[in-house]
Image: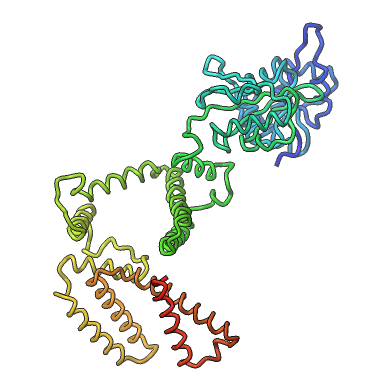
Amino acid sequence: MVVGSIAIVGLEFDDRDMLDAAAIERLRGADTVVIVSSEHAAAGHVRELGIEALTYSDLGLPTEAPAGMIVEALLGLAEKGDVALVSGGYPFVQEGVISGILARAAGGVDVFPIASPLQVLVLALDIDLTADVDFIDADTLAGAPFRRDTHLIVTGVRNAIVARAVGMRLLEFYASEHTIVTAGWLDGGGFDLELMTVDELTRIERVHRDTAIYVSPSRIVAPEGFDELVRIIAVLRGPDGCPWDREQTHESLGKHLIEEAYETLAAIEAGDSDELADELGDVLLQVVLHSQIAAEEDRFAIEDVIARITAKIRRRHPHIFGNVKAETSEQVMRNWDTIKRGEKERDSILSGVAPTLPALMYAQKISRRAAGAGFDWEDIDGVWAKVHEEIDELKATDAGSPEAADEVGDLLFTVVNVARKLGVDAEDALRRMCVRFERRFGDMERAVAERGADFHDLDLDEMEELWQQAKHKESANGGK
């Protein structure tokens, strides 16, 4: 955490053969002054001013240290107090130093001396003026056309009100997290550079006089749509992103994917469109998160996920995208199963059904696979006979015994086959029954409360009467 400020100070003589007074004052006020080397052009000026300075060598840096090493060294010194890095000529040292400090130091960076905020932005951020650059005054920004894929410099930001208005205009074109750089006059001379987001600019309370704002090119889709969601997740997983998101793995997110799927199902059953839209978004978030994690590991990206499901859908719908005929849902499912079996080598007809599915869903899937291979009763009467057989076997077991558990499983699996024969989804049927039970039981509790009685004091006959009343009420309301 940076606690001190960082300044880049250029020491050069003006046309009166004088060093800039504000720059000298900034050096004298620093806790640590850093120069490249004792032979550096600015080293003599520092000695003449009677200021002690550390060289790159003192900091363990080579004279031609790359920008990243310089930034790390300055940030380390700033943890103990104010730091000033001295350069000869214009005060921008080398490419990447100021932009590196801005990206890491919350307090920004001061620059001395320079002629204007526009000049400090152009030089500090290494903007190539031969490239596309839009210069727009803040007063005309509201109606000015500009492109998001060029450099943009907004001048004439004279106070916080103007700055916030600029921020609101930028939000129409850039994501709220898009980073910008402000450059404004310091009261004591020099310029202050600060890195912030467009959103932060819309809420800024104070700006330096005659501030200019630099907005880097943005080649992403406007802040909406699927691409923006993918970009946001990449930001959250990035070095300066959310700590929780950065810690996630495929394994840690697994339970969340299941939870979101069930919450989506609950929204469907409730018939709540707004809630369904929210929950589907949560499911989509999980898909994008998993894809981002895989992309960081160079395994696959969201584009691969989309490409694979697109190809799979086309491949499994030859009756739409090919010359296969399928006029009923049953024919479609037979084709689907045949195509799936041909897509991957399987050791068994039942291979590929995830055992982590809810038990009823798991049972229905494997029974349907077996039936598709011909292992099935001729008609539903055979299944009913099997149900009665399993009930008799269950009755013959001892309560709580392993045999009882096995026979309960046999009975449930057979009932799943009854559901399959009747064209009913067993998982959905049981879930709907649970919802009905909970609703009816709630009606019973409310009826007892209205009498001023305690539910636990009721006998079974009274409870049955209340249950039948709740069922009748439900039927009268159309099952709702």
Q: Is residue 323 left or right of residue 71?
A: left
Q: Nearer the viewer, residue 295 or 335?
A: 335
**Furthest residue in direction right, as rendered:** 50
Q: Residue at x 20, y 68 (%)?
A: 370
Q: Is residue 322 left or right of residue 287?
A: left
Q: How is the image coloured?
A: rainbow
Vertical comparison of 473 with 276: above or below: below
Q: Residue at x 80, y 14 (%)?
A: 19
Q: Does the rendering let one see residue 393? A: yes
Q: Is residue 404 left or right of residue 180?
A: left
Image-quadrant location for residue 201: top right
Image-quadrant location for residue 74: top right
Q: Position of residue 278 (x, y in %)?
A: 48, 53
Q: Residue at x 26, y 90 (%)?
A: 392
Q: Is residue 99 left or right of residue 353?
A: right
Q: Quadrant of the C terminus?
A: bottom left
**Furthest residue in direction top, as rendered:** 15
Image-quadrant location for residue 449: bottom right
Q: Position of residue 262 (x, y in %)?
A: 43, 63
Q: Position of residue 303 (x, y in %)?
A: 37, 41
